[in-house]
Image (cartoon, rainbow, N blue to C red):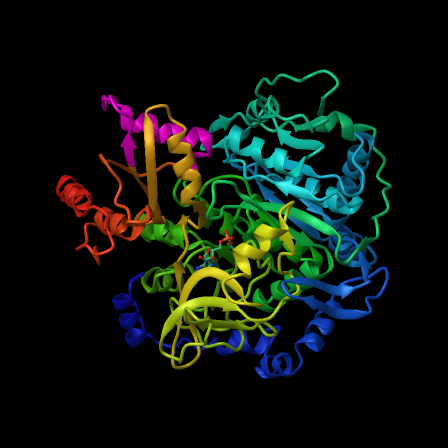
Amino acid sequence: MGEEQLEVLFEETRLFQPPEEFRAQANVQSAGVYEEAAADSAGFWARQAERLTWFEPWSKVLEWNPPFAQWFVGGKLNAAYNCLDRHLDGWRRNKAAIVFEGEKGDSRVLTYQDLHREVSQFANVLKSLGVQKGDRVTIYLPMIPEAAIAMLACARIGAPHSVVFGGFSAEALRDRIDDAQAKVVITSDGSFRRGSVVPLKANADNALKQVQCVEHVVVVKRTGIDVEMQDGRDVWYHEAMENASANCPAEPMDAEDMLYILYTSGTTGKPKGVVHTTGGYMVGVTATHQMIFDIKEEDVYWCTADVGWVTGHSYIVYGPLANGATVLMYEGTPDYPNKDRFWQIVEKYRVTILYTAPTAIRTFMKWGTKYPESRDLSSLRLLGTVGEPINPEAWMWYYKNIGLERCPIVDTWWQTETGMVMMTPLPGITALKPGSATVPFPGVNVEVVDKDGQPVPKGSGGYLVIREPWPAMLRTVYGDPDRYVSTYWSRWQGIYFTGDGAKWDEDGYFWVMGRVDDVINVSGHRIGTAEVESALVDHPAVAEAACIGKTHEVKGQAVAAFVTLKEGVDVQAGFVDELKGHVAKKIGALARPDDIFFTAELPKTRSGKIMRRLLRDIAEGRALGDTTTLADAGVVNQLKEKYADEG
Ligand code: WTA
């Protein structure tokens, strides 16, 4: 988002006060919570920690040796126990924990008691396969209850999980299994995708050809397609569960024991394994979920993210279940079998809270209002968004056509690394501005700084940073603490750099503008330019590649690639598709470039750095910015001439 556009945003902004009806029943009704947290953030987080059940109390809220933090020092707890066992003492044991809607319209309800039983049984299955406390387990599953069951079973026995999004390719899966040195992989025969089947088990088999660490593969039968089961290695989930005992005490974990690893794209080709631990993470997600989503016992809460992303971890599984909420889980896409599928689901289950992504909203906008209008959305009382900046137009559309002008919208800014929402309205008290994630959550200290790390005055922009540690923060990069320090904490001493640019306005509201590093946000999914570049260079015809994010009406950003070919290579018909397909095969369909531009050379500075800024200008068909540092101005001119009409 350019500077100009932001100025316009500021001018047009209209404030939306929380409706009186909502305000009166909200979980947080007093703005005093901000002052209280600002005056004593340790005390604030200590009070939030009381939401959880601890086996042993902690002795100190925070031990901070920048940039390494320990939260709730000495405390012992178990995440699965907090999500399940403690709800079994009272009436909640018969409350729906997960309401599952399959792509085909099949549905399944698991009460807290059901979920507890399945998780305990599956935890015993994992133990019988040799998984011990500390061992890593990779989960590669569709959006089915077994994904949550597998995660919670790992948490129950203290085995960190690494969930890999089912849309990732075999090679991407292999890299993640290998980096985590996983002992067991949990997958399914396949996953449904718009009526067809994606062969997850076959992908896993391919991934496993090149790794040594995996001893067993557990396979959930979901689609019924044929799969090869390797003797001695592979077991069917349903067979293993048949004889598994439902008695599996939750392992007492130290607050700082690892709960999970989640891989995310960075600025190099190798994805980073973001490490989250148990105590602080659980405190962070439980408190934010309760306060931001205003969760009540009667709510039907639906977060449309996939469990393969952090949003699914924090706000489908750990936060909501720790709060004893009823969570709706949907397997499929918004357009299958029809474009009203989301609204049909809202109507069918009387969904009260809907948390989705701007890219989905822009897609719905394009499809038109007739789909939501054909369904009863009157059960909705709160809406949320996450994953990328929401343009005010999409915000207004969501507000009017889905929220029917009665539902507050919580625009939540956060990251895989932050674990929990960091900036957001509190829906009962915060006046909303379309397009702004508003203000930091209580106890969170966010700032916009200039290149020297100095706070910028209100009304201006810069780099978005986090000044103080927070409970759900990542603790390290798995197996690479140096990378943790250099990626996040080295630009300015003791300050966490988010990688985002932002402005804050005269009211102190934050406007996140998007990534300022080499990360592209495609439909709310982070893709590293370096990852796509190395996938392209992997093709035998490609000599060099540079990728950038190009503005896209629906996806927010799309990948555009500039490619130089090896000497003597001729661009044949179908070659562009072949290259795009190569990237999809190496990483997954989500990384497939929209555009590929061929060039004899890439524009570089005299020190050999690719000038992505100029590539962006070319891809967007804009006037070129400053070219004085270019080593060879001719390169850009040729590119510009060649792509002037296509850009
Ligand atoms: C972007 C997703 C603007 C941002 C939870 C961030 C947002 C990256 C918002 C993290 C928002 C997320 N407004 N931008 N409400 N939410 N982002 O790790 O660029 O997949 O750095 O975590 O998404 O993406 P990640």
Quadrant containing the N terminus is bottom left
> Is residue 587 inside the magenta stretch?
yes
Q: Say above or below: 460 vs 80.
A: below
> Percent x, y for residue 235?
72, 24
For the point 63% across and 51% down, the residue is 481
| x, y percent for residue 393 | 32, 62
Q: Is residue 113 magenta?
A: no
Q: Residue at x 66, y 76 (%)?
A: 41
In magenta, the rendered stretch is 563-589
**In screen coordinates, is 292 left or right of 47?**
left
Foreground of the two, 250 or 592:
592
Q: Position of residue 594 (x, y in %)?
A: 31, 39
* Left or right relative to 624: residue 240: right
Quarter occupied by residue 8? bottom left
- Provide residue 130's location: percent of width, then percent of height: 81, 31
Residue 403 or 558: which is nearer the viewer? 558
112 to 410, vertically: above or below: above
Total marks shown come to 0
